Amino acid sequence: MTINEQPSASHEQAAPEPATATAQAAAPARPVALITGVGRSIGIGAGIARQLAASGWDIAFTYWTPYDRRMEWGAEDGAAASIARELEKAGARTAAIEADLTGPDAPIRIFDEAEQRLGPVTALILSHAESVDSGLLDTTVEAFDRHFAVNTRASWLLIREYGLRFRGEPGSKPAEPGAGVGTGAGAGRIVALTSDHTVGNLPYGASKGALDRITLAAAHELAHLGVTANVVNPGPVDTGWMNDELREALTQGTPLGRLGTPQDTAHLVDFLCSPQGQWVNGQLLKSNGGAAP
């Protein structure tokens, strides 16, 4: 298991003028969101990262290139650095961390790296996934174990590490009108992405079902920290994995007559992470255009 820092683009700048320095010192600190599974520029994770960066968050994100290499779509060269540059243009500080989530020590190392580079994590967004189609009769033990290691065990360990380290004020004060993102009471957020797919996709669906229960448990077990935890099912989102036949079938099965986009998911996650989303807690939310399971 390796975790490698992916440097983001930067340029040397002259020392700011005194007035600029004063303005920077007076500017409120941006809270930090840690987003897993941001390995491709057209993926849901990248869409969430862009939205949160635009909403005032600094972004640490993980990716694992070997996974993309063994999938049909292949790896996107330079994706992490490119995504980081986009986020920085939106005003975010970034930390791109390559992480193999099959290793049980990965969550500790991820949080160590994120905190060292950006500071304490306020929001944890779980958008990573191991997803290889197989059914009841043809799933191998190796594939089953890998799905649960990545989708379930790693998610539990990331949530646990978040709970052990979260330093927001305890309690759950209501959001003030017009309040922006912050790190005070009731600011902690956990959002996990799930799926209702089961038929022909046994290990993926089963491991995501277990993830749901872990995340919903966090809504209660971490309540004393001022943390909310929710699960989001984004429905059929085309991020390059669909063939033409599947794309057409899913489009016809959605009342709105289109597939989901990463932006659709990102808007909901952005709301859940905002002060205005604080009262939504312990829920499994479907943001799927009304698509039938």
Image: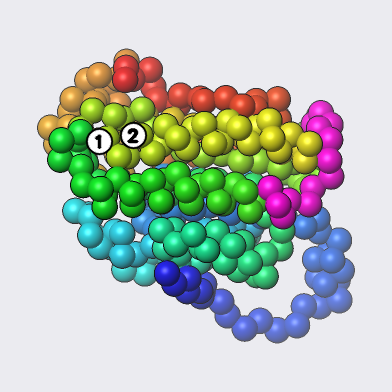
Residue type at tag 2: Gly
Give neighbour class at mark 2: few <14, some 14-19, many 20+ (Cα, 10 Å).
Answer: many
Q: Residue at x 74, y 34 (%)?
A: 223
Q: Which residues are magenta?
A: 163-175
Instruction: Work out which residue is located at the far front of the displayed protein and give it.
Output: 141
x, y percent for residue 122: 69, 49
Residue 227: % across, % down = 71, 38
Disc 1 target residue: 201
Scheme of colours in the image: rainbow
| Residue 286 appears anywhere in the view | yes
Position of 254 relative to 164 (above/below)? above
Q: Please determine whether, in this image, residue 173 is positioned above or below residue 52.
A: above
Residue at 21% in and 47% down: 140
Image quarter of residue 292: top left
Q: Is residue 92 left or right of 172 when viewed as pictured?
A: left
Which residue lies most toward the left here? 245
Q: Is residue 284 left or right of residue 165?
A: left
Q: Quadrant of the C terminus?
A: top left
Is the Cβ of the residue at disc 1 closer than 8 Å to that at disc 2? Answer: yes
The answer to whether one can see residue 240 in this image is no
Q: Nearer the viewer, residue 28 or 216?
A: 216
Does the magenta run of residues contain 257?
no
- Mark 1 Cα shell of 10 Å, populated few (<14), some (14-19), many (≥20): some
Disc 2 marks which residue?
205
Distance between the alpha carbons at the discs numbered 1 and 2: 6 Å
Q: Is residue 36 toward the left or the right of residue 208 in the image?
A: right
Pick the quarter of the image with the N terminus.
bottom left
Give x and y (percent) for residue 155. 50, 47
Q: What secondary structure predominates along the stretch shown in magenta?
A: loop
Residue 61, percent across and down? Answer: 52, 58
Disc 1 marks a residue whose amino acid type is Asn
